[in-house]
Image: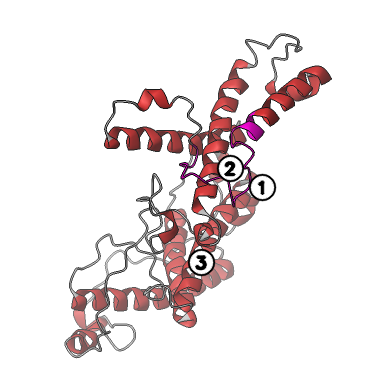
Amino acid sequence: RWLREAELKHGRVCMLATVGWISTDLGMRVSDSSAFQVSTIDAHLSMVKFGSMPQMLVWLGLAELFGFMAMIRMYQGKTDRAPGDFGLRALYPKDEAGQYQMQLKELRNGRLAMLAYGGIVTAAVLTGKPWPFFAVVESRATTAGDRSTFCSGLQKAQARSSTAPRHAEKAEMERSQSLPFLPKPAGLTGLVGEEIGFDPLAFAETFDPRWLREAELKHGRVCMVACVGFVAQQFMTFPGFTPTPNANEAIYSANPAGWAALLFLAGFIESSSYGGKITMLDMFEGKRDPGNFEFGSGFLKGKDDKAVNDMKLKELSNGRLAMMAIGGM
């Protein structure tokens, strides 16, 4: 399974790389900037100088992390995932025979692309010319007999399709909406937003999911206030603090007494909100809902369950956005 996973991944990358190389040689660019007006061979060095290579490595590394988690769960027998399956079903046939043919075509095209890309790079370096690396004849007759198929031919594959081995039918695994190549996390059941199913590192299977949601809501609320404060900092200032238009410098201009007052206020809220029960083991005694401090709950009175759930989901989503926003700001 690991070998097939690696083969499919390399094949997919080489199919994209082959199309990208030819497209670049044909003059296609993502921008008219002079930084992009380079040959395909020099594109790598240009990306490093331009600063886009580190960003690509970060995003690719993130995708690899999620893929690694999916593979680990497959090896542990927790999912019925097949090698190379990341849950993408666009243009995927519904019938079993069609799915087998689609998988076979992808595998063969990937193998061909790995060979093709190696040949493209070699020809480009040796000739110093763009694709197709040789003089193009304007008119050239081709016949059906000139064409051949890769890996024993599609005709034989089609003939075999009726007798191809079939895997035993398995119950369809319920997949995560956010990461369809992973199963829906069981630990999020009963929490707002559980239908999204985002828990790729399975934290909810290790820690109390209520404690995790409590922390998520609290950080989200703090970051929503922080985003507003970051912008408002240049227009208003608390009494006793030094006006500082640059919010990044405000932390250094605050006087010790002001800092002490803010820390005391934050500590008092933290210690009194739970009635002295601030550990993961006892903070939810009494069946308290995560994040519910009876603050602003009056706005939910008289609303049906759907409206209450929508309001909680909006708070959760805006809090997640704010956590990313304050980091970017």
Magenta segment's dominant SS is loop
Q: Which amino acid type is marked by label 2?
A: Ala
Residue 68 on the magenta span: no
Residue found farthest to the front: 286
Q: Residue at x 53, y 58 (%)?
A: 203
Camera-side mark, 2 or 1: 1
Q: Are marks 1 and 3 in contact (CB under 8 Å)?
A: no
Q: Which amino acid type is marked by label 3?
A: Met
Residue 11 lies, in percent from the top left, at 44, 72
Separation of residues labelled 2 and 3 (CA atoms): 37 Å
Residue 287 lies, in percent from the top left, at 46, 45
Separation of residues labelled 2 and 1 (CA atoms): 9 Å
Question: In the picture shown, does residue 195 fall above or below 153?
Answer: above
Please indicate whether residue 53 sits to the left or right of residue 130 in the image: right
Task: Say which element carries label 3.
Answer: helix
Q: Which amino acid type is marked by label 1?
A: Lys
Q: Are marks 2 and 1 in contact (CB under 8 Å)?
A: yes
Residue 283 on the magenta span: yes
The part of the image, by quadrant, that contains residue 240 is top right
The residue singled out by tag 2 in the image is: 35
Instruction: Indicate which disc, 2 or 3, sits on the residue closer to the N terminus.
Output: 2
Q: Is residue 249 visible?
A: no
The residue singled out by tag 1 in the image is: 49
Q: Is residue 224 visible?
A: yes
- The segment highlighted magenta reads 269-291
